[in-house]
């Protein structure tokens, strides 16, 4: 869940063509597609016959065929074919289409609205999801036309909130845990701005000279946390997003989607080196988060204190979480 009723998916690399993508969020399964007219459609990923999942992964289809008993649905969710139902009584195919979910887009993102009585047009999504931070994100290229590069998943042995806390410490851990990353950032110019449900951390690029025009981070980096579990990182020609999914009290899955400016899409060497650098940072963070999880379970730890000059985004996250848990 990203904010109230909105669930989030990244778009595919072909946003204007028919496509589908299956995604599990919590106990719910969804399928999102564009039909032949390019209209965005979203449904619960469940066949109406015996509850089989219809779709896995992503790709292009002209219809959805249940792998269990062959029931077939159009990209608009209508039931096109119900196999071997001769003799069934009082069956109305119009009542057995896929259960729809409202969908909308903002920039490169697709969001699903689980509250059917709430409007899902783009303006509502922008206001409810991003609030007053949307203009700053737009001005920093978050909603620009970028090309999808790849997806990577990390299974981490820590509570999902531990991963979020690590992201939100205002660069506190960077010079100690990410020395390679720190060399490319000017941490003296690290700042954090708090919005309604979003916190944005910004940092200028470092002065370290790079050879062969290899500059992954660029002149500035922006790190946006959208409550409760989504991160947007925009730096140089890159954007990556992190969706954190709880899998239990001490386990979570973090889904990374990488995007790049179209002009660099064919620069395989640059992309490979950049992804390798990113992987190194993620591995370092996994070690940190799993170590914190073990420390939290120690009888020696009770409660920590916030460092007020850097950990205000973390404090903001905790306040929002406390408010949500009290409801």
Image (cartoon, rainbow, N blue to C red):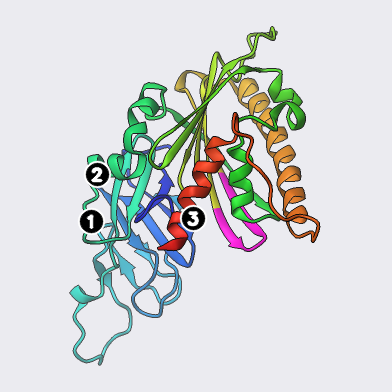
- Determine whether, in the image, residue 86 is placed left or right of residue 170: left
Circles 1 and 2, Cβ within 8 Å, touching? The answer is yes
Quadrant containing the C terminus is bottom left
Q: Where is residue 262 in the image (x, y as percent from the top left)?
A: 45, 23
Which residue is painted at 33% across and 27% down in the image? 135
Gap in Å between the C-alphas at discs 2 and 3?
25 Å
Tag 3 secondary structure: helix
* Residue 201 visible: yes
Hey, which quadrant is residue 140 in on the image? top left
Residue at numbered disc 3: 322
Tag 1 secondary structure: loop
Gap in Å between the C-alphas at discs 1 and 2?
9 Å
- Determine whether, in the image, residue 48 is placed left or right of residue 152: left
Residue at numbered disc 1: 118
- Determine whether, in the image, residue 229 is placed left or right of residue 54: right
Circles 3 and 1, Cβ within 8 Å, touching? The answer is no
Quadrant containing the N terminus is bottom left
**Which one is earlier in the sequence, the residue at label 2 or at label 3?**
2
Mark 3 closeness class: few <14, some 14–19, many ≥20 residues within 10 Å: few
Hey, which quadrant is residue 311 in on the image? top right
**Which one is earlier in the sequence, the residue at label 1 or at label 2?**
1
Residue at numbered disc 2: 124
Q: Where is residue 57 in the image (x, y as percent from the top left)?
A: 49, 54
Near-viewer residue (151 or 240): 240
Q: Is residue 80 above or below residue 316?
A: below
| First to last magenta residue range | 245-255
Gap in Å between the C-alphas at discs 3 and 1?
24 Å
Near-viewer residue (31 or 203): 203
Q: In this view, does 201 lie above or below 90?
A: above
Q: Where is residue 10 in the image (x, y as percent from the top left)?
A: 43, 43
Q: Is-magenta flag for residue 7?
A: no
């Amino acid at each position: 869940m990203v904010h109230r009723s909105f669930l989030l998916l990244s778009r595919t690399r072909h946003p204007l063509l028919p496509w589908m993508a299956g995604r599990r969020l919590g106990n719910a399964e969804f399928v999102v597609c564009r039909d032949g007219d390019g209209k965005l459609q979203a449904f619960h990923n469940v066949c109406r016959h015996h509850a089989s999942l219809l779709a896995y992964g992503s790709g292009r289809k002209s219809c959805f065929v249940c792998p269990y008993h062959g029931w077939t649905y159009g990209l608009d969710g209508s039931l096109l074919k119900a196999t071997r139902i001769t003799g069934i009584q009082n069956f109305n195919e119009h009542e057995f289409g896929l259960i729809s979910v409202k969908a909308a887009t903002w920039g490169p993102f697709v969001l699903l609205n689980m509250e059917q009585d709430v409007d899902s047009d783009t303006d509502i999504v922008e206001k409810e999801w991003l609030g007053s931070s949307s203009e700053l994100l737009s001005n920093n290229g978050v909603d620009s036309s970028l090309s999808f590069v790849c997806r990577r998943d990390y299974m981490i042995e820590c509570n999902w909130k531990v991963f979020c806390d690590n992201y939100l410490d205002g660069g506190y851990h960077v010079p100690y845990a990410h020395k390679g990353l720190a060399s490319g950032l000017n941490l003296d110019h690290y700042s954090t701005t708090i919005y309604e449900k979003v916190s944005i951390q910004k940092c200028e690029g470092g002065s370290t000279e790079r050879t062969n025009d290899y500059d992954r981070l660029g002149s500035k980096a922006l790190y946006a946390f959208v409550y409760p579990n989504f991160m947007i990182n925009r730096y140089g020609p890159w954007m990556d997003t992190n969706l954190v999914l709880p899998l239990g009290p001490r386990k979570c899955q973090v889904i990374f989607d990488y995007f790049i400016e179209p002009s660099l899409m064919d620069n395989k060497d640059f992309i490979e080196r950049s992804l390798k650098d990113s992987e190194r940072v993620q591995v370092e963070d996994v070690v940190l988060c799993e170590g914190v999880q073990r420390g939290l379970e120690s009888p020696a730890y009770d409660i920590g204190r916030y460092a007020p000059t850097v950990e205000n985004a973390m404090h903001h996250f905790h306040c929002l979480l406390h408010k949500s848990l009290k409801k």
